[in-house]
Image (tube, rainbow, N blue to C red):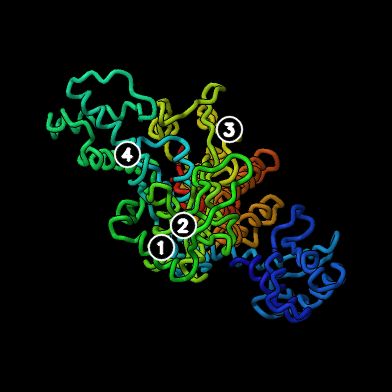
Amino acid sequence: MNIFEIINSQIKEICRMQFSLDNNPALENVVCEPPKDDSHGDIASNAAMVLAKAVGKKPMEIAEIIKGALMKSSLRGGKADEAATFTKIEIAGAGFINISLDRSFYIKVLDFAFYNSGNFGKSNLGKGQKINIEYVSANPTGPMHIGHARNSCIGDALANLLQFADYDVTKEYYINDAGTQIEVLAKSAFLRYKEALGIDIGTIPEGLYPGEYLADIGKAFAKIHGDKFKNDEQYPQEIKDFTISSNMEMIKEDLALLGVHHDVFTSEKSLHEKGLIQNCINFLQEKGLLYRGILEAPKGKAPEDWEEREQLLFKSKEFGDDTDRPLQKSDGSYTYFTGDIAYHYDKYIRGFNKMAIVLGADHGGYVKRLKAVVKALSNNNASIEVLVSQLVKLVEDGVEVKMSKRSGKFITLREVIDTVGKDVLRFIMLTRKADQTIDFDLKKALESSKDNPVFYVQYAHARICNAIKAAKEKENITLPENPDFNMLNHRQELKLIRKICEFPRIVESSARHFEPHRITFYLYDLASEFHSLWNLGREEGVRFIDSQNIELSQSRLSLLSITKNVIALGLKILGVEPVEKM
């Protein structure tokens, strides 16, 4: 039912045939979308303008050729063919092709949406392809904070979206349980264990984790082991494993409160134990993708992984990266990136040719290197989409609340959920594109106003539920088996219908571009069109419940029912529960 994609595909095929473009890359820039001005029709295409250079003709000339071919197509309105869809094509501006749809198309979409409420908007874009989505992957060094919430919400909504678009999704969490930060964690927990035994530890030394959550872990460990390790100078392996396990349980509990559940948890430590890292190095060596050399000093501040010495390097530049990447440190230990290579190789051999990962704001430099390593390990047979989740500024009473895991001064994710609820948190975290920062205002998140997007959308759903219930209880008007949507002719009814018909396009474009925030934007716009129609009941007498005109009431209530279902479907993708009362 995605008419935008149907016509877009037809326009591309016309261009291939008329201009011998075949699979010219310029065709990828051709889009069909709703025009900004309703008076310009229902669908606008930029084909003539984006293909002008490739075709070697003026946009207006290209547009006329496309228009002529479309007018002869099976979609042309006025024919006896049941597929008749559009009635008018106009060329405007610099060459936009504006298409007006036949009313019968809207009726077909509404009928489908009414009778197939659970499947409306679903896409077969993925065609059942397996995809691995890794997200959250917070270091198991302490409780989760608001920044982790955004990564969690983006990844989880993306997983839901791709499932809705017919991908076979596996949701994965990578446990960084090896490396320097884990050594620091173990030392910190061991100090707290001694504190639990009554030993005066004084001030927490600089460089260790000072959080009070470690005091609880120290007490729990002491309860199990007593003073067995009291006189040890170095921390035992037991407290290291216990602390990681305790923190991971805490993280999983926090994620569950947010409605986030992963299918797979993969341990970095296990990659070392299984020898996967050495296997990957051998694999890349055999392919001629490793060499010993000296990296040039980067411009500006040198990153942590640069050393002016001969070292083992991966030919990352051959696969689109900015520079080759070191695999070993001066002490012989592997770099963090080497672990990433083994991890993504592990994903690939598990059968994932398509992958996605949501990284934190401080990992923006990993985008190109991850794309490079996936290409290298798979002989260009696999790909990875990398999303970088930007920072969240938590605001309370107009003041930004600072967060620091190392100082122990931060607002935990659990505290935010307790304040605003998981649905509000999830929705607001998806009101911006992943690469844009968000100011999360605790008070505004709870406002009952149009300025609070989650309230505005939920209010639309609740209003419709109340209207359908009131119609049945007060006037005995119920939803019909076969509503007549031809009765809906008011301009605002038509605007709402148009917006409903966009849902399949929004789902497919969101999934294609890995941008779940588009669903949030769409739901706000859909709610806005509904609220505008609702308000006309007072202004222009557009009534949803009219005992003098049962059939029209049933048609309007059926339209509202579809709107309610689309809102529920969109909220489900976001991981938000629709409400029936407010």
Quarter of image, res 61 = bottom right
Check disc 3: other Cα within 10 Å, few if <14, some if 14-19, many if 20+: few
Check disc 2: other Cα within 10 Å, few if <14, some if 14-19, many if 20+: some
Please give the residue where the numbered disc 1 appears in the rendered image.
Answer: 281
Give, as a three-letter code, the residue at label 1.
Ile
Q: Tell me the number on the disc at residue 449.
A: 3
Relative to residue 568, is residue 237 drawn left or right? left
Residue at the image position 51 percent from the left and 65 percent from the top: 375
Give, as a three-letter code, the residue at label 3.
Ser
Q: Specify whether residue 547 is in view.
A: no
Marks 3/1 in contact by CB < 8 Å: the verdict is: no
Marks 4/3 in contact by CB < 8 Å: the verdict is: no
Please give the residue where the numbered disc 4 appears in the rendered image.
Answer: 183
Alpha carbon separation for disc pair 3 and 1: 57 Å
Residue at the image position 44 percent from the left and 40 percent from the top: 148
Please give the residue where the numbered disc 2 appears in the rendered image.
Answer: 312
Q: Position of residue 346 (x, y in %)?
A: 38, 62
Alpha carbon separation for disc pair 4 and 2: 25 Å
Q: Specify whether residue 51 is in view.
A: yes
Marks 1/2 in contact by CB < 8 Å: the verdict is: yes
SS at circle 1? helix
Alpha carbon separation for disc pair 1 and 2: 10 Å
Q: Tell me the number on the disc at residue 413.
A: none
Relative to residue 68, is residue 521 drawn left or right? left
Give, as a three-letter code, the residue at label 2.
Leu
Frontmost of labels 4 and 2 is: 2
